[in-house]
Each structure stands twice: as structure tokens, then as C-alpha cells.
Amino acid sequence: MPAAPFAERARFDARDKVLGRTQFTADIQLPDMLYAMSVPATIAKGRVRSVAIDEAMKIPGVVRVLTAKDFLAPIPPPRGATGMAAAPAVPTIVPDIAYRGAPVALVLAESIEAAVQGAEAIQATYAPSASFSPLITSEGAAREPSEPVKAGNAAEAMARAATIVEAEYECPAQHHNPIETLSTTAVWSGGRLTIYEATQGAQVVKANAAKSLALDPAIIDVKSSYIGGGFGQKGTAQRQTALVARAAMLTGRPVKLVMPRGQVFHNATFRPLSRHKIRIGADASGKMVAIEYDADHQQSRGGQFPPQYHESQPQMYGVADYDGTTANVRIDTQAPGYMRAPHPHPASFAFEGVVDELAYKLGKDPVAFRLAHDAKVDPVSGHPLSSRFLNECIAQGAERFGWSRRSQAPGSMVLADGTQVGFGVACGAYPAITSANIARLRVSADGSTRFAVSAHEMGQGIRTVIAQALLRQLDIDPAKLDLQIGDTSLVPQHLTAGSWGTASVLPAIDAVAAKMKAAIEELLAGRQIDGNLHRKLATVRRPYIEVEVSTLAPGQEERALLGLRAAGYALAGPEYPAFTTFSYIAHFAEVHVEPRTRRVRVPRVVSIADCGRVVSLRTAVSQVRGGVVWAIGSALREETEVDPRFGGWLNNDLADYVVPVNADIGDIDVSFIDRPDPLLNATGSKGLGEVAMVGAAGAVANAIYHATGRRLRRMPIRIEHLL
Amino acid sequence: MQPFTYTMPRTVAEAIAAFRQAGPDASYIAGGTSLYDVMKLDIVRPRHLIDVSAIEGLDAIETGRDQLRFGALARMSAVATDKTLLRDYPVLAESLWKAASQQLRNMATVGGNLLQRTRCLYFRNGTGNPSSVGLYPCNKREPGSGCAAIGGLDRGQAVLGQSDACTAVSPGDWPVALTAMDATVELAGPDGSRAMPIAELYRLPGDTPHLEFMLQPGEIITAIIVPKTPAGRRSTYHKIRDRESYAFALASAAVALDMDGDHVRRAHVALGGVGTRPWRARAAEQLLVGQRLTPESALTAGRAALEGARAGKHNGFKVDLGARTVADALMIAAERSA
């Protein structure tokens, strides 16, 4: 039976955070610790010829400088390995420079100031490559087709279409910019390597550090307590980890690196530029019948982040015939990677734009047009969609937003001062994925509870979700509840990303709670003892009970747990054996465009999400607000820019990579359908963090069209595009 | 950032003496919001910092006499919230509170603000430093090395006053408002004290873009004087940027109007964000004299303000945007009661 709605609960860690007690990874201080500073390459491609360290070593406080010769060749992946296990090790410091900013040396010093001064004093010489390809349009860019996604026969269906709209959209390269930049602290002691890293994937870091440093993973522990923003950048192994770990091993002292933001722009994974060519055909009645969609994106020479832009578009509007193609365009850059709603965000900006174009071309209201395209079946797998309340999201959103006050013609809503007003709608979906999980719970007679489980806290509120679910099941003292997550020394840690955190932890909580209740029942053997579990244990003089469980996604095989233990990767969905399931959202945006200087304001957004059962309303609302804020940033502000003569990223700081500020954000009204998915898990919870952002940028762009009559197909939309 | 010595004199005379003693590698520092930034980026490398912020009596705001006088050490936040300014010279107050963030305005001084360095990306990110990563030629940073912004990503670059050696925008807001309002700066230095119209403080880049200010070595700004004018009340600082706050101007306009009914008796117009120095628009001012102010005549004046503008690859929009910004500023100012 699906779980009842959850009551509101304050954030589990709110008090500590407000009091400044929460220790983020970049805050760690250890006795005898060395500070590291990485030295970035200043060429776009080539080879390091020499690194002179003498001047740096003269600086008081500089202890040692590591260069390529201090690193060993990594162990190649085991034969027959697949998935993440087969991925090549992240390079350490190597003489070959694949992109500007790659580390050429690591300076270790007694203070951060000495480390920085030492890094400035390093003199590297290079043999630059004769040419390099910094843009997808550069000579030497290599287009490489990737996996297609097809359903039915789109060409045949398109041939029968009465109305066709075709357009090309583009999304720029963007960077995550969490407040806490990449940070790693490593300790080599007693034959064990302990890595404190702000990561969403402690097991991923462990596996990759082992490969990069040719170590047995069994001697490595990775701990990620609180992360100052991850957004997917901290989900994959990044360049700094093995450097810092090696430095700790060579010096025998703890070593800490907090990478400067400019270097993070150059070394960390980022959202690649992507291009989207879309044709949608509608029949004579105005029903969408065929979709052809070709997507490509910028890729590094060896990068593996796939161009999966057909992750949720085929399931949006019940179109049976879909032809989705993809390609990587390989150039000289660092590897791109996952950034919030990695594929559906850019894909929905493009797709929902073309849907909007088609609605206008057909003379239809964009809300009514979408409502007329409900879906029951996933055309790709043929499975039923297990819970889909997108139309409920659209209808409720239209009501709350006051969509009926809109007039259809672009440019028809004008304020007295000439400001143009536009209403826009766009929708999104995101796969509901589940990871296998392992959890261990200890309830003690002294009133304490320790719960170790696979999850990471990026600020999204996973600790609040865990506490909410655990405390509903077990009568334990919330004040002495210790939630131990992100720590590979306790239980294996899945990569916490892709909105699967909640749906993956809830089954583990259900299982561990049931096992604990059974163990206590067995212990009491029929005796009735009043009070909470701690009191019961104390009464029978039992110091504690500990239970461990492992859980699997629907239809998942037991061996998935091997993947979880090895590399933190044990995923299933959104296609499960008998059903497919997604989370959905509808966004409505109002924009105001100034008559003369053409600034775009977004005074309000209404967002209604279907993420199944909502476990923690407070953190869920916060997730959606954050997603909408970022989508406004994406639509109107953010782009990382490359000067092709030099390579690298030019606007590599928070002053010039323009994210929204408070004054840019108006009212964001969030609510939820809150109806459980009947098949995915007992609680009926899907995911939310990713879908929150999907479609919101499209809603803004569609509103700008409605306000001005200008269809702008490239993000970000800036003043110069509307003058 | 290299190590430096640090002294904190108590008087202007002590500060100048400290500078003479320290020699050419010395730099004055007040709020530090700009200097520390360019030091961390390895753009400037002073060996001696002379912190003038403890000098007494240099932070006064005097509005009661026949001119406005701002001590160089008055904080931006203090001047921005001065009640007389808010009522009688909104152009000055607005230029300050639309700059930076509250935290920075609490630190930064109105004297130091006049000497802020450009935000040109190639200037800032080009030293190959561990923080900035890029390595770009820049005549302002390294004379004779070339200008990477020319032919590059020049969306933010100047369209007025640029040379073949440099297109970097003068970044300030407050200097633009002061330029419109005919301000004078008071200086003290090894050779004594003097006063200079603010328009003369800023050089055009020409073929020496590394020389930005008409200051002698060891000279320090002690005060800013603004003559009182009835145009002050009908004034505004209008700033257009890539976000609502915490950003430098793409285009800005400081305007003040002396009106006779709906006709302009005298206009003050200066632009920011588009020029290599605060840009006084005399042609626009003259065009407005005697005119009835309408959205159309305001835009004509705006176009005159951008006369002679030359665009690069990506900043052509600034010519149009600058004209429109002036036009909107004129209409906003005219709405205000004298």
C-alpha cells in the first residue's frame, strides 16, 4: 500500500548550518597538514618540455614540488571490464597537455600563501602543438556518431504530416560554479590512504584514485561529509584527487588542495555546448505524429560523457514515431560531463521551443496544445508509463499562473510604459532511476542510533529525507540520530546523482526498519515493554542491535551489488521489467521586456512537479526553486566563452561567468501533485532534483517570443538579441 | 602574490614621506577592494603597501556649503546613503549604490574608486597565474605585448576612445557621475597640493595604455569637489548590465537637467561602460539646450552622445544600447521634481 503523505519537517542539519558548525570538505584542518597549489599549463595543446622548480623551492615555506616524474603509470582496467570499471584512469600530472589549464606541477608548502607564491614561481617550458581545435567548428574537430534512439518509423509518419516545423537550437558551454570549489585532503598513514573530498561519489573517487595511482582499492577510504554544491561536477572523478593523494604518500603528511576557481573552469567537467536540429510533424487535426531530432555536443578527444539527448523527449507527448540521432564532436578541451539535468535541460529548451513554434503555427494555445498530447505508453520500450501526471501539472499550473489572462498574439500584451509582457509554458521529464543500496543500522540502549547508508549530501537535503523516513518507521530518539553517509569505510557508496538519491534510500530504510523491528520482537519474545526502542533495549539489558540490509531496484539482479561495491554504480531504470517511469514538471514564466534598453525580467514563475510521493516538502520546494533559478540563469545569463586563438575559457570567474543574483529572481511558486508511483518503490517516490530544472529555460524563451515576436533559439538570450 | 611590506601612516604628510622612502615599487592602498584583487591575479606586484585608511579627517562628507566635498576616504556606502545627496544629487548616490555589492561598498572609498582598474578579460585573466590560468598579450599589463581583445571576444570592450593598442573599458560608475557633474579632485604629493578637473584625471589609451591616470608618483587623492547646481535634483544614473546587480555596466548614463518647463536649459551627460575613460557627451548636451524633451529628442541626444563610436566584432550593440540608455536616463531625470 502506498505511503501516506509525509508531514513537514525542518531540515535535519539546519541548526548546525545556521550556526556555522557544519564542516564542509574544504574546511578541513589536520595537524601537520601541507597546503597544495596546482600549476596550470599555459598552452592549449602540446607537451611539457621542462619544469624549473628552483625559484619555487627558494620561497620560505615551500616543502616540495611534484612534477610528472613523481607519478607512476596507472594500472590499466581489468580484462573484460565494462561500464565505469572500464573507464580509463583520470590522468595525474603527465607531460602531454590536452588542454589549457591542465596541471604541470603541484607545489606543497607550510601555508597556503607560500603554496600560491611557489606556484607562481614555477617556470614551465612547452613544445606546443602546431595546431589545436578549440571549437566544434574548428578545423580538426571530429564528428563521431553515437547511439541513436528510435521508435516506429518517423520518416514515414513525417511524410504524411500536414504541418511541419523545423528549427535548430543551440545551448552554450556552461560551468557549475558551486561555492565550494574542487577540494581534496589526503592522509597516508598506517598503510592506508584516506581521502576527504567534496564528492557526490565517494566510491567513484576511491575506484579512480586506485587506478590513477596503481593502488589496491582495499587500502583506500573516501569520506564526503557535506558538499558545498555539487550539481554533477562532483559526481565524476576529477583531476586533483590523485595528485593530492600522491603528495600525501610522498611526504607522509596530510595534504590539502582547494583548487582556485579559474583552474576549476579549466580542469573540471562542465556542460558541453550542444546543438539540436528538430523537425516535428503534425497531422491535419493538429496532432503531433512524427519527430526527427539530431543532437550533437562538444566532446574532448577521449571523453565519455554521452550525447544522450533523447533521454526523455520521446516519452513527452505520446508520439509513436521518433527518430533520434546523436554525435560527439571531438575537440581539444577537457572532458565535459554531467551538470544538473545534463541532457533534458538543453534538450527541453530546444524541443519545447519547437513544440511552441508548432503550436503557434497551428494557431493553438500552447497549454491546450500540450494537454492534447497526453501519453500512456513509452514508444521506445512499449511499456506502460507507470505514473504520469504531466497533464495535471499543466492544468494546475495554468490555473495558478492565470494563463487565461493571456492573449495569443505575440507582442499583444503591453504595459502603459511600453514594456512588453509575455507568458510562456514548457514542460519536462526526467528518468526515474534507482540504485541498489546497502545500509546498516545500530540502535543502542544509551539512546543513540547510527545509520550508515549509501548517499551524499550536496545540500539537496538527503539527510532530511532519511531522517523523515526512518523516524516515521522507528520509535527512536531523533536528537541522537547519527546519519553516516558518503563514507566508503562504512558501507559502499553509490554515486548520488540523477535524482536517484531518495528513491534509492527509501527501500533501504523500509528494509532496515523491518529487520530491526523483527530483531527487537525476537529479542523481547513476547514481553510488552513501554517506551521507545532504546528503552526496550535498556530494559532487557541489551547494549545495542545492529542489522544490515541490501536492496535492489525493481527487476535488478543481485550482482548489481558487485558494481556498487566496486565503483558505486548499480543503476536501473527508467525502463524496468514491466513499466517505464519518469518524473514530470510544467513551468510557466512571465517575462517583461523593457521598451528601449530591452532588459528581460522574469517577475514570476509557477512550477508544478510530479515526482511521486513527496517525502520532504521543504527540501523539495527548495530543489525546484533552485532549478528554476538556474534555468533563468541558463536562459538569460550563463555562457563560458572560448577565444579560439588561445583555447581555454576566458570568463573563468564569478564576475564574468554571469549567474543570476537575488535581484534577478522574482516569485517562484512551487507545488506538487504528490501522488505515489504505484510500482517503483513502496513509498511511491520518484526523483526531483533534476526534473526541477527541465523545461524552465524553455518557458522563459517561449515567454520572450510571446512578448516580442522574436524566436530566439540560442541560450543565453541577452540584451543585444532584443535591441 | 609576492610578499610586501605594510605601513599605516596617520597623516597625509606621513603617507607621502613613506612613499618617497619606499620608492617606485610602493602603492597606496585604502579599501583594497580593487588593488588586492589585481595583486592576487599577479597583474600588479607592489613591494610596499602604504595603507592610508587610518589617516584622520579624510572621510568627511560636506554638503552644507556652496559646494559638495567628499573626503577621499569616505566609504562608498556612506556617500551612497547621504540624505542630501539622495534628495538633491541622486545621480551621485545612484552611481554608488548601483556599483559592486553592499560588502564592497562598505570597504571601498570614494577616492580609491576613481583609480579602479579595467575589467577587460584579457587584462585580468592573462598573466598565466594559478588563479587566472589564461596567458594573453595585453599592452596595458605588458607594454608592447599586443592587445588580445582586438579581434577577440570583445563584447565588453569600448566603442569610444579606443586605440589600436587598447580597447579596455573604464569600469567605474562614480567617476562617470562626477564627470557629468564637473567634479574636481584635490591631490597631495611630494611636490605639494593641487586640484584637477576630473576629466583631466583619465588618459585615453593611445599608444601608452599602461598609463591610465594623470597622477605623479606619490600623489594621493585627498578630496573630491562637486559644484552645486540646480540640475542636481533632476538627475539620475542609469546603468544597464547583464544582471540586475553586482555587475559592471554594458552601458550607463549619468544625466542631470536644468529645465524651464518642458524645455532644457542646460544638460549634463556622461557615459560609462562604452568608453576607455568616463565619457562626457558635450555634443548631446549642446543638442538638448533649448529643446523640448520628448522620447524622440532624448533618443536624438543619445545618438549624438555615441557620435564617433567604432565597434569591434561583438560589441556593435553597445552603440545602439548606449544611445538608448542616455535617452532613458534623460526621461527618468526629467520626471523628477526640481
Image (tube, coloured by chain):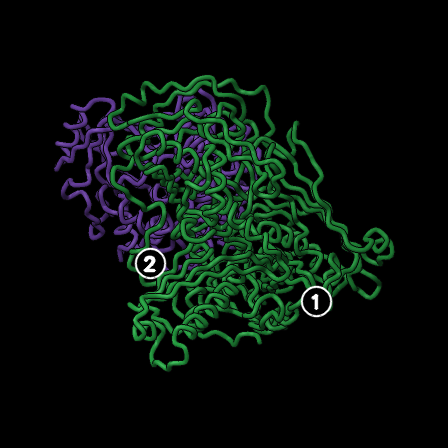
Q: Residue at x 43, y 60 (%)?
A: A440
- Residue occupying image coordinates x 15% and y 44%: B57
Q: Quadrant of residue B23?
A: top left
Q: Chain of mark 2?
A: A
Residue density around tag 2, few if under 14, some if 14–19, many if 20 or more, within 10 Å: few
Depth check: give the residue in front, B37 or A150. Answer: A150
Q: Secondary structure at mark 2?
A: helix
Hue used for the chain lettered B: purple
Q: Which mark is residue B174?
A: none
**What percent of the width, then of the height, locates residue A22?**
32, 55
Q: Quick one: label 1, few (<14), some, or many (20+) residues within 10 Å?
A: some
Q: Residue at x 38, y 29 (%)?
A: A106
**Is A663 drawn above or below residue A129 in the view shown?**
below
Q: CA distance from mark 1 to mark 2?
A: 46 Å
Image spot of residue B178 (x, y percent): 33, 43
Task: Tell me, yes or no, if residue A228 can be seen here.
Answer: no
Question: Residue tagged by mark 1?
Answer: A365
**Mark sitting earlier along the chain (1/2):** 2
Which chain is displayed in green in the rendered image? A
Say which quadrant the N terminus of chain A sits in: bottom right
Q: Amino acid at mark 1?
A: Asp
Give the side of residue A379 with respect to residue B97, left or right.
right
Q: Nearer the viewer, residue A359 or B223?
A: A359
Q: Which residue is mark 2?
A: A17
Identify the residue at horizontal 19%, vertical 37% (top origin).
B52
Seen in the picture, residue B274 relative to A379 is either above or below; the reply is above
- Image coords of residue A580 (percent x, y): 67, 62
| Chain letter of the residue beneath label 1 in the structure image | A
The amino acid at mark 2 is Lys
